[in-house]
Amino acid sequence: MKFKTDLALLCSLSFVLLSIVLLFAVAARLQRIFALNQCSQTASEIGSALSCQLETARSLRGFSPTREQARASSLQLRDHLAEQFELLKQSCPPKDQQMQSFILLLQKDWSQVESYMQDLRAGFETSWQKSSSIVEAMREKIVQRNQLNRIEAQASLKQLYLLLSLWLLAAVALTGFLLWQKYRQEQEQRRVLTNYLALSRDFGGSGSEMTRGGEAAESLSEAPLADSLEKSLAFCFERFQQESQSKDSFFASMSHEIRTPLNGLVGFLGNLAETPLNDQQRQYLRIIDSSARSLMHVINQILDYSKIQAGKMSLEDVAFDLHAFIEERVAIAKQLARGKSVKVLLQYEGEKPQIIRADAGRLRQVLDNLLNNAVKFTERGEVVLELLCRPEAEDPCNLKLDFAVRDSGVGIPFNIQQRLFKPFAQADDSVARRYGGSGLGLSISSSLVKLMGGQMQLQSRPGEGSSFSFSLSVLAAKPEEQVYMSELYKVILPRTELKKYWALLVDDTPTNLFLLETICQSVGLPYRTAQNGREALELCRQQRFDLIFMDIQMPIMDGYTAIREIRKLDNSGRTHIIALTASAFQE
């Protein structure tokens, strides 16, 4: 709409400039036509005056005092001719060289005629003949010049008509364009309002909201359309904001309700695997565990996509061993490739820093997804994880990491590559039927790479394989900043020494609470339980705990409030608290 408004303004300004130019052109044409007509009229009068002057001079042959009246008339005609010549000079267009030359020629001929007329008054017959022939030639020149002036005036008049027609055509075209634009603008506004009302009905608008929408539509006939559109769009934007907030709340609630029992299921499957089972039971258990983890993976993908769309995805900055991190990714991919004629290789070039700072979790998610896809779509051949590490030229403390996952699989057609990074996109329907998947993996990976400051690139040819690559800038860290994941699972104290420490387990879900109890029992850690934040706060007032597992989303008092109140207590102000959550937007 703004583009159309700017175009209309540009057309209007162009028409104004065209009108100004045409106005000057028309004025010039009119001035020339007037000047040519004036010259023709003056030249005709000069021709008539020349004839009269010649006849008067002839009648004065043998001049005598009795012919004083004829002499005075001759002098008056001579003065009149001089005035006409001066008027002819003034009416001549300034830049018309031909007309100026014509006037000079007439003046020269007239000077010659004047000399002959003096002889004619003295009675010389030859002077009459010479003067008569010169005057006749002058009159012939004047007639020819007047004909040329008329032709030029007619041409100028045609040009004037053409300029006026051009201006009229431009005015009609501009008027038609402005009317057409106004009509299209009104149609666009009506379409927006119609779609808005349809969306309101689709969103379940009712009662006062639908009444407001109806009033907005009816106001089209009662108020200016722009005002109605502005009010309706403001209401529509407010409604969309409410729907967006409701959607975020829904995802947060659903993530908690879905992932809470699923976490309990996966946790107890791990506990069940440590109990005595026969081979068939272990096979069933592996199938159940694999299905549960697949479901958890799909749910996590959907929740990650929701957080990215809502702009609530955040990155962490932790120190980790890059080389060990990359080798772990390749080792996991090799496990996936077992049973297939596929080799998983690592090509590491350039600098080999021990420790870097980045979001290891999100980088792991991107690389694992690319490697999983490469192994999945490669029946035979190789999958290569390439990494080139080099210092940045601007700041040597920063490192440039060039990642690439290359495979010799089926490849991707060019027309499908354009939409491959869009949500829920796959190569074709047969891919979903054969390999499964939600179609969110590459979209999430591309968004995460962009969030980390990179750009996902794809090179692929059908039948030759694919290569996904991206580059990231990271900061080299000191070794003492690193946290090794393997050390998190080491037992710092013997189980016999854990008996003198107490843990507080807080969760409103019985399944999760029971899972935490089994973990504490397995390591010999004494514990007490609470089902909400208020109960946990009362227990902390009665007893000092060395470790607290706190669920965040609970009734009566949530985890955040409980943690703040516990920090105020003298005996529990420095207690280690581990927050537990299954929410998608509060992690």
Image (cartoon, rainbow, N blue to C red):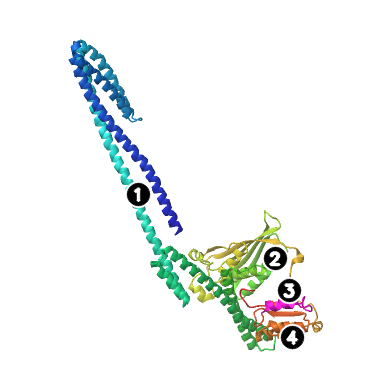
Q: CA distance from mark 3 to mark 1?
A: 80 Å
Q: Mark 4: which secondary structure? A: strand
Residue 237 percent location from the top left of the image: 50, 68
Q: CA distance from mark 3 to mark 2?
A: 14 Å
Q: Residues within 10 Å of mark 1 (few under 14, many from 20)?
A: some
Q: Mark 2: which secondary structure? A: helix
| N-terminal label among 3 and 2 | 2
Q: Residues within 10 Å of mark 3 (few under 14, many from 20)?
A: few
- Residue hosting label 2: 322
Q: Is residue 321 visible?
A: yes
- Residue depth check, mark 4 versus mark 3: number of the one nearer the observer: 4
Q: Amino acid at mark 4?
A: Arg
| N-terminal label among 3 and 1 | 1
Residue 500 percent location from the top left of the image: 81, 83
**193 or 367, nearer to the observer:** 193
What residue range appears in magenta? 558-578
Disc number at residue 486?
Answer: 3
| N-terminal label among 4 and 3 | 3
Q: Residues within 10 Å of mark 2 (few under 14, many from 20)?
A: some
**246 or 263, nearer to the observer:** 246
Task: Examine the rendered structure and indicate whether residue 131 appears above or below residue 257.
Answer: above
Q: Mark 1: which secondary structure? A: helix
In the rendered structure, are the residues bearing label 4 and label 1 in contact, judged by CB atoms less than 8 Å apart? no
- Residue hosting label 1: 170
- Residue depth check, mark 2 versus mark 1: number of the one nearer the observer: 1
- Residue depth check, mark 3 versus mark 1: number of the one nearer the observer: 1
Query: Could you tell me which residue is drawn at 51 percent across and 73 percent down?
Result: 431
Q: Mark 3: which secondary structure? A: helix
